[in-house]
């Protein structure tokens, strides 16, 4: 029953085109209730382990909650109430702790390494041809190409610590971590948004749960950033099986969400076999705010 209710919450949670991104938030609690909250969240694997417990105000601490738990806590008081562990539900009903829906926390802003900052000060870079941001940046594949075209990266996010460390070594500045913890006001203006969003839920080697998977659901963070910053174009990448997951319904939701955010989307399968010694086919989605630009890209 618990599993069926979880799936129901998952299925009804992410509205296509929702500009608010995935469900996020934190349980706000005084120190005396902190361990009870953590234990209850860990029982459902709802606590964000990569995000540290942090100060909310002078008397309370905030425990960040993963999207699966955030959806259930958003619905607390309805039919989904039984999903919330009993000790946490009791504290919520008594008002001893509270649910802060939409709360996002970044422990530190991305900044150039001291060596990169010194090099930049010694030889200031010329004005960029365009500015771009990259989500799910990995080790910086998009950045390698876009810097070569005269672009300048103004924001990057990557949750995997090993990939983020490699990114910093490659480019001299460290990306922010979990994009779901980055508030809207921390997102800078940019002309192009790139994202190789998580492919595990779309890949043939996985369960192919599509947008019903917590990793696939992260696509809506792209919609959030695009809706907030309104870049002229988006360049997204994923596995070819995205065309077939859920009989194409997942891709339909993705394209529809981008359209509701104001973008005209074009799709193209590309194989890197001509450049690397392997068959590496990927699906690229190019989306433009300007219809004429989208038409020109389609004709190219």
Image: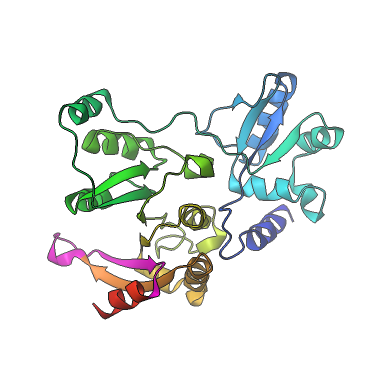
Residue 248 x %, y %: 48, 75
Residue drawn where x is 36% and y is 49% of the image: 134
- x, y (%) of residue 114? 26, 23
Magenta stretch: includes residue 189: no
What is the residue that sits farthest to the bottom in this orientation? 299
Q: Residue at x 40, y 71 (%)?
A: 265
User: Is 130 placed left or right of 227 in the picture?
Assistant: left
Residue 195 in sight in this render: no
Q: Identify the magenta region.
A: 272-291
Q: Residue at x 19, y 34 (%)?
A: 124
The answer to whether 246 is drawn above or below residue 209 in the figure is below
Relative to residue 152, is residue 122 depicted above or below?
above
The percent coordinates of residue 28 (x first, y second) are: 70, 31
Nearer to the camera, 121 or 11: 121
Q: Position of residue 227 (x, y in %)?
A: 51, 57
Specify the color scheme: rainbow
The image quadrant that residue 199 belongs to is bottom left
Front residue of 22/58: it is 58
In the rendered view, would you say 232 is above or below 49? below
Q: Quadrant where the C terminus lies? A: bottom left
- In the rendered image, the residue lying farthest to the front is 127
């Amino acid at each position: 029953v618990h599993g069926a209710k979880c799936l129901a919450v998952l299925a009804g949670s992410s509205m296509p085109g929702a500009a608010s991104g995935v469900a996020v938030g934190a349980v706000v609690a005084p120190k005396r209730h902190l361990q009870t909250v953590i234990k209850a969240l860990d029982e459902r694997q709802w606590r964000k382990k990569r995000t540290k417990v942090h100060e909310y105000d002078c008397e309370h601490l905030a425990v960040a909650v993963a999207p699966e738990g955030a959806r259930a806590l958003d619905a607390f008081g309805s039919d989904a109430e039984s999903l919330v562990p009993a000790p946490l539900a009791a504290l919520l009903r008594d008002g001893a702790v509270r649910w802060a829906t939409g709360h996002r926390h970044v422990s530190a802003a991305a900044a150039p390494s001291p060596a990169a900052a010194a090099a930049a000060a010694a030889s200031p870079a010329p004005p960029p041809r365009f500015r771009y941001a990259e989500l799910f940046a990995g080790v910086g594949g998009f950045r390698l190409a876009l810097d070569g075209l005269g672009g300048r990266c103004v924001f990057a996010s990557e949750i995997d610590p090993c990939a983020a460390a490699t990114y910093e070594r490659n480019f001299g500045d460290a990306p922010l971590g979990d994009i779901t913890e980055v508030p809207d006001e921390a997102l800078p203006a940019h002309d192009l948004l790139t994202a190789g969003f998580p492919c595990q839920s779309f890949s043939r080697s996985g369960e192919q749960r599509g947008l019903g998977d917590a990793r696939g659901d992260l696509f809506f963070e792209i919609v959030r950033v695009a809706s907030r910053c309104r870049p002229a174009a988006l360049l997204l990448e994923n596995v070819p099986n995205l065309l077939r997951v859920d009989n194409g319904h997942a891709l339909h939701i993705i394209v529809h969400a981008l359209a509701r955010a104001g973008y005209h989307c074009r799709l193209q399968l590309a194989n890197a076999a001509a450049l690397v010694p392997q068959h590496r086919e990927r699906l690229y989605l190019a989306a433009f705010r300007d219809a004429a630009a989208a038409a020109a890209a389609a004709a190219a």
